[in-house]
Amino acid sequence: MENPDFVIVGSSGGGGTISWLLAKAGFKVVVLEQGADWAKPLEDDPLKYNPQPHDEYRFRLERPELKRRPRGDYTTRRASDQETAAPFGAAWTGSMLGGGSVIWGTWSFRALPIDFRLATHFKVNGQLDQLKQEGYDIPDWPIGYKDMEPFYNVAETLLAVSGDRNAVNQGISSSAWYKAFKSQDHFAHAGNWKPDFAFPCPPYPLTPVGHLASEGFKTVGWSSVPLPSGMVAPGSSSYKTQEAIEEAQEHWVGDKPAFWKQSASKIWSERVRDACNMCGFCGEYLCWGKNGPKSGSRASTLKELADLPNAEIITDARVFEVMYDPRNRRATGVRYLDTTDPDKPVTRLQKARYVIVSCGAVQSARLLLMSGPPGGLGNRHGKVGKYLMFHLFGLGATAVFPADFQGLLHGEFGHTGNTMTFDPYFINDKPSDETHGKWWKGGTMVSTAKKNPLENATLKLQGGLIRLDLLQAMEIYNRSMEVRLTGDDLPMARNYVDLDPKFVDEYGFPVARITRDFGENERRMFVNGRPLLEKVFEPYKAVGATVTSSDGSLKLIGDHQMGTCRMGDDPTQSVVHPFCRMHEVPNVFVVDTSFMPTGFGLNPMVTVVANALRVGTWIVDQLKKGSEL
Amino acid sequence: MGNLLDVDLRSALENIASALFPFALWMQEKDTRFAPPQPDAPWRAGGEQLTPAKIGAVDFFEALLQETAADAGLIERFQNISNAPLQFSPLADAATWRRQRGLDPAPSFGAAQSDNLLVGFDGRPISRMQFYADYWPLLKQAVQTAVAQGTIDWTTFTEGLLIDQSVFWPTNQPLKSSNFAKQFARDLLYAMMDMRNNAPEPWKFALLIELAEGRRVGNAYVSADTQAAVDKLKSVLTAKLRAPAPSPPVLPHAIPPVGSPRVGSPHT
């Protein structure tokens, strides 16, 4: 496309959402995605549900792993800057049209109001100084829950979230930490703790694994909540996004921007999405339904975008530079490699008035550091890449049931999670005397089914098991389940992304180097969180279950990558301003998880989509008013 | 059946596959712990023996060799890039660009180390076609040597391969029999569990059936299915809770920690 208004780099929850909104508002938009369009063959197939993606090897084990990493690309990793980083396979979200929102786990949470005010919270409770001494740099967000709330409502409609709002509200308000804080002003006024906007779909059906976790939560004295899931609920006759958006418009909180004052029929087509039928090939897999049972930008906004004459999507486009004109401190477009034939890439230039970066927190930082002056684009204060956060994956407990439970857990039903609890969102360091202990940030706990028997068997084999030993070990997987804590990973300057000085990708560009270690808050979570995780399974010891638990792992990083382009008011301390516009390069925006000042204790997808809607709405408002950004 | 494996090689592979996955022994042993999930399956009620070959694993394996033959080209390209990592850079002067950013003037290409290629048990990138082609003459020689000494006990033969202690494996060459046997076992798992094998049902799913795994290509459920499964679980739980507490199960092996990295690739 000649002279588009916007070029958007990346097509997941951030890029895939904002590109649609801008195009719908009438702007000329080009989306560049480094991966291929994996869903296209299914979309073109006459079958409504094509089982071709039901292939565990292809989606979990195959190498090169093209759904996540472009061929010949990788990252490097080390725990601290005292070490030399080594090539590493993780820290990718998705490399296909729709990005990580195609292969995500669909766990669909809003951030809680206090997540936007963590610095204040820890200050009021006398913990901020300790956290600072421990190396954390925790800011309040420059926006609050109320700024996000109307966009959370819309985001949930785009993601067709299945859930029970009352159960979520009740789950939060009945937790011990909520009761401990609710009389504190900053907490009570952090935002709407009890939103009344109903999820657009009813809760996902309860599975055996969800039931076991739920009963375990209750035994501990916790609430159990059906996991809000980004999927058209099984059993629904269909899902009409337009009608759901209309609901969100009617429940708008605060002043309604012009874009959202249009009738829903002007905003969204009559497109209908089909229900999930619980095939079980979900997280990491391309959904087999051609009409979008599983939510993500490819199933929603990008389909709408493709209908618009003023929008273009280009796949296999690996952007390696945001073009920058230092004379007026503005970007002029991007350069990318057209890797339609990866053996013979072609360099192309895409000019645009505005550039929106949305490649995931690791790759967005890498792109900005490869662009502009040698120190990186918008990086005069050295903040690009800093405050990298991941959630504490690996922190969980496993229950192995005895052999008479073989075949009873049905890990094959639906997606990975099913029931959850908010009770460990803050974890007390004196569990036997909570009133005298301190509450530290934890996260959401979710039931987790065992869904990939081939991958498990292959791991066992690689671990040294063979013959009868291997077969016996393979059995156990079927009668195992987990609860996992999506533990918050508080921001530290010493955790960051930069350009690896040594290692390059297939086309000679420096790969992203990840420097990240756990801090004291994470270690506290391991010490205080693991007993809670194990406690959930305590009742099942009576039937012979064996329970083990594990800490978070530094190697389990990637899906929830956050930080690196912190949002803030102070240009010396942050990279983007409260509408995700770069302080130093005003026509560049960053709308993936990079902008997040803190990381919550839950999946960030809904927040990313909501924020992209918020930023896109602001851009439209500004440009329609005639302001030059 | 393809034409990559000759009759002798196919026969040897089928025997080694059966030794790697001793289903009869396993079923006999596990039947003492839980009831067969499908007692009328032909390998139980029909008197036929369950082997990897009957599951179509060796046929699948042969097709897999062909299907993944192009991997060799990528490995060669990556090896070539390793020798000159900046050769495909689109930048006009990549060396200067790197110098301006304080990057090492002698870069490395680490894709293989990052586990974004299929890696063999010796840690090196492999193309299945090339990998196995190197092993076929050695395997044939080992089988011939064993045959010359009488009837082959395939269990003993395979155990020897797995621990590099085979008296039949050719010496004075660098390839370890264990790398072959483990890679073959890995590919057999793929053949027997990913449901792309070509055997007739229920043989196609035999291993999954014996594991009581419900996962199948094309599965679709409604909430009545999940509710029925929850109800059944509840009834078993209730009955077990009323019974005297059993001893915890003896786990044959440690359970990997939650979120264990996927094969060779630490990952979320």
Image (spheres, rainbow, N blue to C red):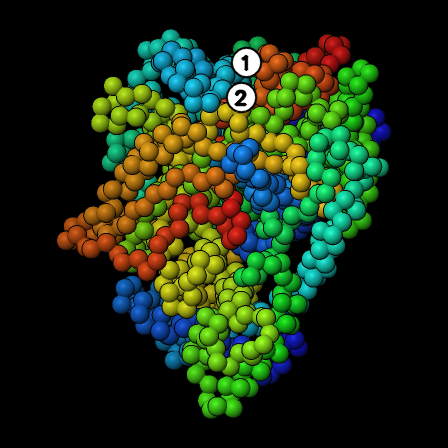
C-alpha gap between disc 1 and disc 2? 9 Å
To which quarter of the image does residue A446 belong? top left
The amino acid sitting under disc 2 is Pro
Q: Secondary structure at mark 2?
A: loop
Which residue position holds label 1? A142
Query: Which label number is shown at residue A597?
Result: 2
- Image coordinates for residue A314, horizontal then vertical, percent: 75, 38
- The residue most toward the left is B244
Q: Write the residue at 58% across / 82% down.
A: B141
To which quarter of the image does residue A267 belong? top right
Q: Write the residue at 59% across / 12% down.
A: A569
Locate residue B183 relative to residue A334 in the image: left or right.
left
Q: Chain of mark 1?
A: A
Quadrant including the C terminus of chain A: top right
- Image coordinates for residue A397, horizontal then vertical, percent: 35, 42
Can residue A259 be seen? no
Viewer-proximal residue among A401 and A409 = A401
Compared to A496, does A346 lie above or below? below
The amino acid sitting under disc 1 is Pro
Q: Write the residue at 38% across / 55% down.
A: A478
Q: Are marks 1 and 2 in contact (CB under 8 Å)?
A: yes
Q: Chain of mark 2?
A: A
- Image coordinates for residue A407, horizontal then vertical, percent: 35, 57
Can residue A319 be seen? yes
